[in-house]
Amino acid sequence: MEDRVASLLLDWYADHARSLTWRAAPGSALPDPYRVWLSEVMLQQTTTAAVAPYFSRFTQRWPDVQALAAAPEEEVMAAWAGLGYYSRARNLVAAAREVAAMGGFPDTEEELRQLPGLGAYTAAAIAAIAFGRRAVVVDANVERVVSRLFAIEEPLPGSRKIIRQRADSITPDERSGDFAQAMMDLGATICTARDARCLLCPLQEVCQGRVTGDPLRLPVKAAKKPKPSRTGTAFWIERDSHVWLVTRPGRGMLGGMRALPDDGWSAGSDGDEEAPLSGAWRAGGVVRHSFTHFHLELGVAIHAGDDCGEPSGLTGGEWWPVAEIEAAGLPTLFAKAARLALARA
DNA sequence: CAGTCGTGGAA
DNA sequence: TTTCCAAGACT
């Protein structure tokens, strides 16, 4: 059965591959490793629809890895704003500089794995897709498809080991890049998390999950913890058509990103409501935003004393032209807050 | 190993 | 409204 899977899947892929700008046509020449790498990093935990416009902007602005390596990190971070998981952007720059110094991308899974931001999945994906190497590519799609295909009852994440073994057993020696992308397309369009459209599936005749019962209940997953809810405050301080922005510490939430000053809210505790500046404040509204592991209700406080003397006590930030706030590269949470403040100004 | 780390769309 | 989840990496 194992060797049947690749054949069935690759045949299906020839006709049903999704058309994505970073992807080569099935069976065609190997795509540019730079574009494969960039797309794979952007696609980590991120939908193709969200990635598409960012991929276009990045490749237009930085057409190759040398260009990206030469870019100021700050500009790359700002260009990444809104896409989330910002450590990816920091690692992207670091990896680009390593690759540029090496004279090009390494072409083995093991070497790729050493680059910052490349884990087991991404290294395997690039080795297979960009360099035609046989690699066992396991992402959430593959986990789901394999769990159903082999009717694996053990719940995730404990089942990862057996899933990898099973994925290895069906990965072909040739065209493993197309095979990986076919598995992901199958998981994205047919064998999805909320549906199992078995009648449309090219693997229906070999799928054990379909025979053994309800494939939708696979893979079994451990229950998730409820998200806590936190409150915090962001502060809008405007003088002479400029707003005070800070750059957040490199590590942690929204690390390295420009932001409005705030009162220290975090996943673990509410903000302390302490303003960075004395004087009168007025309420600018509330932003509700959900992160991966907690909900945040962020109040926006607007400084009313915009005609007093030079604000003292403001350090570690910069005055940013309000008219160019879009170019500041604020993460979505603070972009929402800024929008609110500007609407109430 | 389990927690941290964004965001927007779908149900 | 709330939950789930999408081409995971890192600690």
Image (spheres, coloured by chain):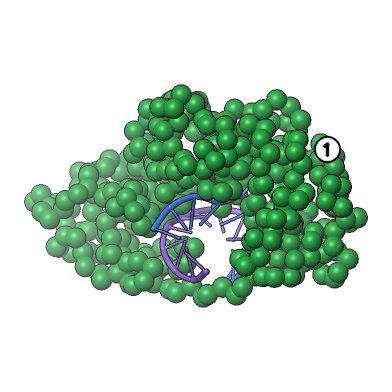
Chain colours: A green, B purple, C blue
Count all numbered tags in the image, as a single digit.
1
The residue lying at 77 percent from left, 41 percent from top is: A172
Q: Amino acid at mark 1?
A: Asp
Report in which chain the residue with disc 1 lies.
A
Residues A249 and A286: in front is A249
Furthest residue in direction right, as rendered? A205
Is residue A56 shown left or right of residue A144? left
Q: Position of residue A284 (x, y in %)?
A: 33, 62
Q: Is residue A303 above or below residue A330?
A: below
The residue lying at 86 percent from left, 69 percent from top is: A212
Is residue A130 shown left or right of residue A96? right
The image quarter containing residue A76 is top left
The residue lying at 46 percent from left, 24 percent from top is: A103
Furthest residue in direction left, as rendered? A309
The image quarter containing residue A216 is bottom right
| Residue assigned mark 1 | A15
- Residue A33 visible here: yes
- Residue A12 visible here: no
